Image: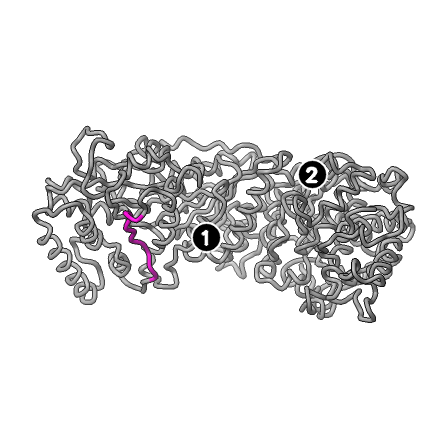
Amino acid sequence: MRPSTPDTRQVNGPESEDFQLLNRYWAAANYLTVAQIYLQENPLLREPLQARHIKPRLLGHWGTSPGLSLIYAHLNRLICRTKAEVLLVTGPGHGGPAVVANTYLEGSYSEVYPAVGRDLEGLRRLVRQFSTPGGIASHVGPATPGSIHEGGELGYSLMHATGAAMDNPDLIVACVVGDGEAETGPLEGSWKAPAFINPLRDGAVLPVLHLNGYKISGPTVLGRRTDMDVAALLAAHGWDPVTVAGDDPDLVHPALASAMDSAYASIRAIQSHARQEGVTGPARWPAIILRTPKGWTGPVAVDGVPVEGTSRSHQVPLAGVREKPGHLAQLEAWMRSYRPEDLFDDQGRLIPELAALAPDGDLRMGALPASRGVGGGELVIPDLGRYAVRAVPRGALMNESTRPLGEMLRDIYIDTADDPKFRLFCPDETNSNRLGAVFEATDRCLLESPANSAAALAEDHVSASGRVMEVLSEHLCQGWLEGYVLTGRHGLFASYEAFAMVSASMTVQHAKWLQHSRELEWRQPVPSLNILLTSTCWRNDHNGFSHQGPGLIDTVLSLSGSVIRVYLPPDANTLLVAAEHMLGSKDYVNLVVIDKQDHPQYLTLAEAREHAAVGASIWGWAGNEPRGSSPVASEPDIVLACAGDVPTQETLAAAWLLQRYVPKLTLRVVNVMDAMVLPPAGAHPHGLSTEKFEEILTTDVDVVMAWHGYARALHQLLHGRPHPERFHVRGYNEQGTTTTPFDMVVLNRVSRYHLVMEALRRARGHFAGSEELVKHCLSQLDAHATYIREHFEDLPEIRDWTWSEPDS
């Protein structure tokens, strides 16, 4: 039974242990943190501090750093005592100098950056590089050994920690949550992790909620709440919190050590019981609430104004040290209070008795293999022939395009049952997105018990052992997956298209992480972040305007071409090929967009592979150019191009009408599956060569293109191509409501009738039958508007249309 009231006891530590050395180690980390923020020379104050030793631009964040170093030192103590594998995730955004200082002290930093050696010259390089051109950023990021979490945007630390622990049974992920970060929505949602962490097969997450009371310029909410209130919040989410508080190191060190020891013992007891007796419900995992002053051990006051323990310590407490002799003297006194002469020897090395406090080898948190993505192994993809749709005759078979993908994912679950390294993450939409075949292999993961026996009988594939991660939060789904893949495993995040924008900023940050990671030789390539958008804007006619939004495509297209990929498969077989590629890829953000509803199927699996290999193809069977003619030699009167399943269907219907009514007009149909083939080759690695681009889309013929997303995004892609003005793009233009499927394309002027009229307007020359066809299009649009209001469904000739040879 869970206790009805949270335990808010103040922990008193192991009285027999001497913490003097640990306190000096903490002092060394604090000293190096301050040195990085301020100094460009004289790193150990071997001569009196002068203005010329100070950087001309002072950047960095001191306020959170002493707390981070305190936690780091105590985790080192725990690792040395237990030999546990501990991954540290630091949520407080710009605590970079503290984490860098600690990885330097343990030696892992110098191993990946030999130029920053463990001597005086190495210390000089260490301080000079911080927040300077050509150096390192002020926050924890890819360049920081041991990190899987970007400190530049707050809110995601605990979800990254949770994802890292999944299917990683030996790992303890310590996660420092800042009280400013704790005010964000994503972090607030992350506290529900105990309902999803299975101690039988997962590692453990140890949150350390660090309450130092202040953000950048004001107080924090939780910093003002009582210990009882904060503990009650965590307890309500299933944690077993204990509070450590104080501003006296002689008391805080033993108390925090005792809390860490107790947490470790609790974690191992929970895991041992689960692995021997099984799991019957969520564990009450330990958590630590640490309340210490912001900017602890720094200046108490500056110019008579309080600093330590206030928001004024957040960044650079003494900002005028180059101009104000009083500030310079105060900085020197502050730095000398750590007694660097007693911490480092004559060569600038940490003295042996302090160096011995750090763990050895791969147990150092800056060297942990999991932090570099090592350990998951490759994912073997089943033979796609098992799931391929028989697309013969073309366009005649209607199929839910994502359903075969669900069958493939099911078999991946089966194939990895003995070596778990794959998970699907989805906000309560797995069945809705037609991926429900996975439940033939596993369940939804939830450790919470149903309210009663009747509820238990009604549940559908829910168990503690499930590996489908459903939680109604796009933030959590994507954040868990990011932690999962950054530690070497594989997965897919599936979301309704419109609501993937909830976590769009996470996608941006992950892409930035990968972009910089690629520049670091010591970083291992990690499995890609794979995002499937379905329930798309074009087929959310039943849900209405709120569910209609293709904006994530625009967001992703604006990111670095070195890491982003955007796929718009027209049918099920091309989706399978795209998924095969994405799940086997490394260091990318892969975005694939396809609807879940019934759609016509066009390509065989072999054709889908050929199409995907190029990314864009002429569909000769859909146009009327002379059979067997070379694309270069042929010169159509108009090109109809499309990207996305609904735009493809409308384009094919337009091509069918044009060939029926205006047979003398020569048209070419081009389908684009990989959006990134459209920019010039220099703008993206997938960009087609000029020769190939012109072979497919001609040199100067007008192109009427139906595009899945916003038209501006496609124009952005075409920038730099010759004569981009010849592309006339129809896409989603923020017209939507609860209506019929065809009315959605009519409202946005992407219907077959609009495409036909645009093609006739742009085609070279005038062709017999054009006027009749325009009249037919206008008549059909009028008939459509009347019919749907009378019958609440689309016209039969629209609803039942399938591709056939236009002259048949």
Picture layout, residue 452 above or below residue 605: below
Q: Magenta stretch containing residue 767, yes or no?
A: no
Type of residue at label 1?
Thr
Circle 1 — which element? helix
Disc 2 residue type (three-letter): Leu
**Is 610 in front, or is 245?**
610
> On the rendered structure, is 287 left or right of 798?
right
In the rendered view, tell whether residue 684 sits above or below residue 260.
above
Colour scheme: one colour
Residue 616: x and y, percent?
33, 38
Quadrant location of the N terminus in the rendered image? bottom right
The quarter of the image holding the C terminus is top left
Q: Which residues are magenta?
A: 725-734
In terms of sequence position, does the residue under pointer 1 or pointer 2 come before the other?
2
Q: Give above or below for 445 relative to 212.
A: above
Judge by depth and name the residue closer to the eye, 5 or 621.
621
Which residue matches tag 2?
Answer: 368
Q: Is residue 717 visible?
A: yes
State whether residue 443 appears in this view.
Answer: no
Q: Secondary structure at mark 2?
A: loop
Query: Marks 1 and 2, Cα distance to the nearest angstrom?
Result: 33 Å
Q: Nearer the viewer, residue 645 or 98?
A: 98
Circle 1 residue: 555
